[in-house]
Amino acid sequence: MNSESAYIRNPYTLVKQIKRKQYLRQIPAILVIIAGICLQYWFPHGGFLYYPALVIALGGIAWDLWILGSFRYNDKIAAPEAGTIVSPLEGKVKFIRQTNDLTLINISKTFLDELEIRSPHPDCVIEDEMLKLHLPAGTISFRFNAREVVWFERPDFSTGSLIGMMIGAGSCTISMPQAIQSKLKVGADISSGQSVITTTTVEDPPPPRSILVED
């Protein structure tokens, strides 16, 4: 088997969209850096402008570095195993709660975590700005909470494939039936498209208990 088949690479067209958005975000920061540098040359005898100009330039550099940190992504990842449902987002498991017949899992993402949103399973669909996976045991939904969530047009929904991006900090709340056993733990570090949430197997119900009645 070709070793490359064990990896999933991001399509060039999607990488191009990510980089284009990044470059557009960097333009104001670069202009601020240029303005801070140019102030010293526009007013060569204005020594009082030295420190304000330095602050402006350093602020622009910090802004640019923040943007670069917000646009980190993996060019390729290891292909997930068949039959698994993987995390769509990188981050840390903030909480796991049981409510009614559902399990709620929250994955928190910082602005330094990679921005990619990857398909948890080939049968996922985008409905009402959420990812949904309809299974015989019930529906697993993935709700994304962030200032900016972008879905790519006509993405490949193969498990682990790049389908969107979350820019900056945010979170993903996963809602799934309790009949489906989660493999995640609170506080665990999660990788987009690689960390296994669960499998498509449903947990077997406990065997019926027999009651012996003595004479």
Image (cartoon, helix red, strand yellow):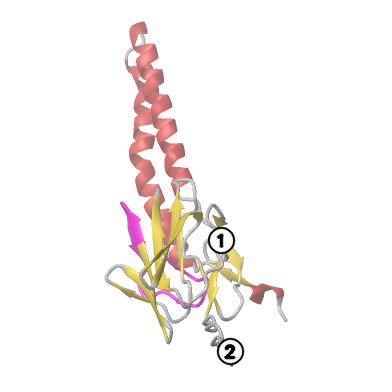
**Residue drawn at the location 50% of the way across and 57% of the way down:** 90
How far apart are labels 1 and 2 at the CA level? 62 Å
Q: Is residue 136 left or right of residue 160?
A: left
Which portion, as a residue range, is magenta?
A: 144-163
Q: Is residue 155 magenta?
A: yes
Q: Is residue 142 left or right of residue 197?
A: left
Front label number (1 vs 2): 2
**Residue drawn at the location 39% of the way across and 20% of the way down:** 55
- Pointer 1 local density, CA inside 10 Å: few below 14, some 14–19, many at least 20: few
- Pointer 2 local density, CA inside 10 Å: few below 14, some 14–19, many at least 20: few
Per the image, the residue denoted by label 1 is: 75
Q: Quadrant of residue 115?
A: bottom left
Which of disc 2 and disc 1 is earlier in sequence? Answer: 1
Per the image, the residue denoted by label 2 is: 212
| The N terminus - image quarter | bottom right
Mark 1 lies on a secondary structure that is: loop
Please tell me which residue lies in front, 201 or 72.
Answer: 201
Mark 2 lies on a secondary structure that is: loop
Question: Tag 2: residue type?
Answer: Leu
Q: Is residue 104 positioned above or below 23 on the image?
A: below
Q: Is residue 87 positioned above or below 52 on the image?
A: below
**Residue 179, position in %: x, y?**
47, 78
**Residue 104, position in %: x, y?**
41, 64
Please tell me which residue lies in front, 132 or 150.
Answer: 132
Please tell me which residue lies in front, 105 or 160.
Answer: 105
| The C terminus - image quarter | bottom right
Question: Tag 1: residue type?
Answer: Asp
**Residue 41, position in %: x, y?**
37, 17
